[in-house]
Amino acid sequence: MVTVDDDASFLGDWQAWHDAREERLVSPYGFLSISGLHWLDDNPQRYAGVPGAWSFGPDGVVVDLGPDEVLSIDDRELHGREVIGPVDEVGVLGISGDLHLEVAARGGAVLLRPRDPSHPLRAAHRETPTYPPSETWQVAATFHPYDVVAPTDIEIQNLAIGAVEDAVGEVAFEIDGQPQRLVALDDHGGLWLLFADATSGRTTYGAGRQLYAPAPGPDGAVVLDFNRATNLPCAYTTFTTCPIPPPQNRMAVAVPAGEMVPL
């Protein structure tokens, strides 16, 4: 039996989570501040509002700065031609005034992504609509790990690039008495689920949504709180490298819980 106090605690926890999610979206350097997505190659290119001419070749990332252009990385001010070198998925952060420049690897390519707090998309953001939170959508599941010696590669399609991720297992559960299984990726010990369902393209974002779950218990028990299913970044901006749920994670049933199509 759910008591009034339990219900209030559930709603309060969800509201705090939702508020924090919205704060991250509209933060000065969140996804809504991204003002461009540029893929570097061996031909130096300049981009509107970004200092320097950027290229990517055998030496890694290179930037050529003009005499009046300002850019720093790791508190080091850059001048003229600078070899930034190889970058990984975490990448490096360049700062020029209020502008942040993310330079990072994605699937063998390298992107340059400026983040500008004054970007109109950030100012125009309206709160993301959601389904009414309900404890019904806190679904008990069982995690079935894959062989840790030989992880299972799974192709994750991307709106910009393709990538291969190590799937760590599957979660099994039921919705309306119908058995479901979702392939799970690792999230620092927890689980990351990319999924689509019968609401996708109707009331929720067409490409699908994502859900983070805590680390399963020793017996594999884990709760999937679909009230906390969130839109993929590409639901808000085209300047992202957005993962798409694999075919195995496209459910025929509806999950009317979590975030809906952004306004």
Image (spheres, rainbow, N blue to C red):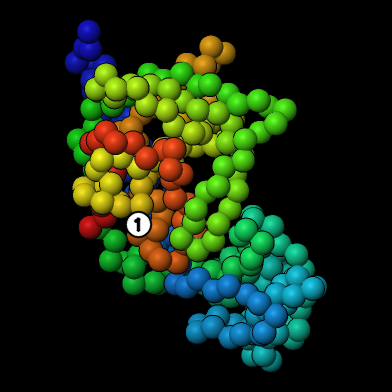
Query: Foreground residue, 7 or 158?
Result: 158
What is the number of callouts on the image?
1
Query: Residue at the location (26% across, 55% down)?
Result: 262
Q: Quadrant of the N terminus?
A: top left
Q: Which residue is mark 1?
A: 235
Q: Is residue 204 visible?
A: yes
- Residue 84: name its quadrant: bottom right
Question: Outermost residue, bottom direction?
Answer: 67
Q: Is residue 241 left or right of residue 121?
A: right
- Residue 147: name its quadrant: top right
Q: Is residue 93 visible?
A: no
For disc 1, the neighbor class at 10 Å (few under 14, some 14 to 19, many from 20) is many
Question: Outermost residue, top direction?
Answer: 1
Q: Is residue 66 left or right of residue 131?
A: right
Amino acid at the residue labelled 1: Ala
Query: Foreground residue, 21 or 173?
Result: 173
Eyeballing the image, is 239 above or below 245? Answer: below
Q: Label 1, secondary structure: give it.
A: helix
Q: Quadrant of the C terminus?
A: bottom left
Q: Position of residue 25 (x, y in %)?
A: 39, 54
Q: Position of residue 171 (x, y in %)?
A: 46, 25
Query: Foreground residue, 129 or 143?
Result: 143
Q: Position of residue 44 (x, y in %)?
A: 66, 85
Q: Is residue 20 left or right of residue 219?
A: left
Query: Residue at the location (59% across, 31% down)?
Result: 168
Query: Residue at the location (64% across, 55% down)?
Result: 90
Q: Position of residue 185 (x, y in %)?
A: 54, 37
Eyeballing the image, is 94 above or below 88? Answer: below
Eyeballing the image, is 88 above or below 13? Answer: below
Query: Residue at the location (30% across, 40% down)?
Result: 197
